[in-house]
Image: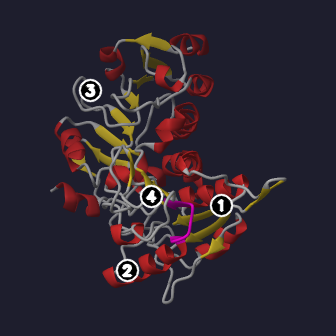
């Protein structure tokens, strides 16, 4: 079984497989071909791959493998029919990728579609592994830009009060952001549209911001539901009120397959104090802050610094690649049966939980998006977008 790892496009510093995964892949029967220079940006040299047992190859040879692992969708040029392509294709936002794979008869395995509530999926969940690092890095970026110290300090020149940090959202990224800010010595406040998140927030050192009328706005697949405009306004007003005197505000709200909701309108930014830093974790999908400029750090007229850095996991490319590689290695080795990669309709990771299961999600399957030129029948929500 051949597994190809192409070099990622410009702007993506991560790599799909790292040298430490070679032993497990080889044991499962995979011959790994990696494009020359694919790991350089993540500090994994070609020599490291060769020493671990991988074969350095041209892009053409890598894309000719029957199994391909990457992070960004690589396009279909050079990939033959029947190839298993595993990547993060974000199919709801990029239906053209699905159409291209259907037309080319490529089996698309979109890892961001993993049924994350299945216990077996935890070790393959690329969303969680990358979001965890993104939440950590968001707080570090906030700390790097804020013009004051974070922890309480008692000095001969006077006492410095701890910084106030507000985290908007407490999913995987938000909880890591809360924990990181707390470790730095900040006083941390956090919000979420899921009332059940209060206990999780408090468990990592945050103080829960409750909004009147809050319920558990979570869908059956574990993601936040879209909210009514009225309730969004209520949440914005409440949380932005708490953030008015904050030093760092981190926004994490991301709705699966949709543009990021605005949680920090420009009118709220105008009330924030000079020197406050807003780190928008969703600049790549429209941004939570109305004033965010994707890929840039800007300063408003009233002195608020807005960080719109995209691809936060990519700023920690070495660690992010290692975790992604572990996810994908576990995924691919789980598909091996009698020295072949088997795309089975009985695998809940591939096709989603069966109807009647506590984990069944109507209209959603698993990571298997399309095969043999057709979209998987369980992906009815996606089919509506693709057509």
The picture places residue 78, in percent across and down from the top left corner, at: 24, 23
The residue beneath circle 3 is 79
Q: Nearest to the eye among marks 3 and 1: give it.
A: 1
Q: How many labels does the image show?
A: 4
- Secondary structure at numbered mark 1: loop
Q: Nearest to the eye among marks 4 and 3: give it.
A: 4
For the record, the magenta segment spans 243-250
- The numbered mark, 1 or 4, whose residue comes first in the sequence reads 1
Name the residue: 52% across, 76% down: 194
Name the residue: 51% across, 26% down: 42
- The numbered mark, 2 or 3, whose residue comes first in the sequence reads 3
Does the image show residue 304?
yes
The residue beneath circle 1 is 163
The residue beneath circle 2 is 233
Using a 10 Å C-alpha cutoff, classify the residue at mark 1 as few (fewer than 14 neighbours), some (14 to 19) or many (20 or more): many
Residues tagged 2 and 3 counted as in contact (Cβ below 8 A): no
Residues tagged 1 and 4 counted as in contact (Cβ below 8 A): no
Label number found at residue 304: 4
Measure the C-alpha gap from mark 2 to mark 3. 47 Å
């Amino acid at each position: 079984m051949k597994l190809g790892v192409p070099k990622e496009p410009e702007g993506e510093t991560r790599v799909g497989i790292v040298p430490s995964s070679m032993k497990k892949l080889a044991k499962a029967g995979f011959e790994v071909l990696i494009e020359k220079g694919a790991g350089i940006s993540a500090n994994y040299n070609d020599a490291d791959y060769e020493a671990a047992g991988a074969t350095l190859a041209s892009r053409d040879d890598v894309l000719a493998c029957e199994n391909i692992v990457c992070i960004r969708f690589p396009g279909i040029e050079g990939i033959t029919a029947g190839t298993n392509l595993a990547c993060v294709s974000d199919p709801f936002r990029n239906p053209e990728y699905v159409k291209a794979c259907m037309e080319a008869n490529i089996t698309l395995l979109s890892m961001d579609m993993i049924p994350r509530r299945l216990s077996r999926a935890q070790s393959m969940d690329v969303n969680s592994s990358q979001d965890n690092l993104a939440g950590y890095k968001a707080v570090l970026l906030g700390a790097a830009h804020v013009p004051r110290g974070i922890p309480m300090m008692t000095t001969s020149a006077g006492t410095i009060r701890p910084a106030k940090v507000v985290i908007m959202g407490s999913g995987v990224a938000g909880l890591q952001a809360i924990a990181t800010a707390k470790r730095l010595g900040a006083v941390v406040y956090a919000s979420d549209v899921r009332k059940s998140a209060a206990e999780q927030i408090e468990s990592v050192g945050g103080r829960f911001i409750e909004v009147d009328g809050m319920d558990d706005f979570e869908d059956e697949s574990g993601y936040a539901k879209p909210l009514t405009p009225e309730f969004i306004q209520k949440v914005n007003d409440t949380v932005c009120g708490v953030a008015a005197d904050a030093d760092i505000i981190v926004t994490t709200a991301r709705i699966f397959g949709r543009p990021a909701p605005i949680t920090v309108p420009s009118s709220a930014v105008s009330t924030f104090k000079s020197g406050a830093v807003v780190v928008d974790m969703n600049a790549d999908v429209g941004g939570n802050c109305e004033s965010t400029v994707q890929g840039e750090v800007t300063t408003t007229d009233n002195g608020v610094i807005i960080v719109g850095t995209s691809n936060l996991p990519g700023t920690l490319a070495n660690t992010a690649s290692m975790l992604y590689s572990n996810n994908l290695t576990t995924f691919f080795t789980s598909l091996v049966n009698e020295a072949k990669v088997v795309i089975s309709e009985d695998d809940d990771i591939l096709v989603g939980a069966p109807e009647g299961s506590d984990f069944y999600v109507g209209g959603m399957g698993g990571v298997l998006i399309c095969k043999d030129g057709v979209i998987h029948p369980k992906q009815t929500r996606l089919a509506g977008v693709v057509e």
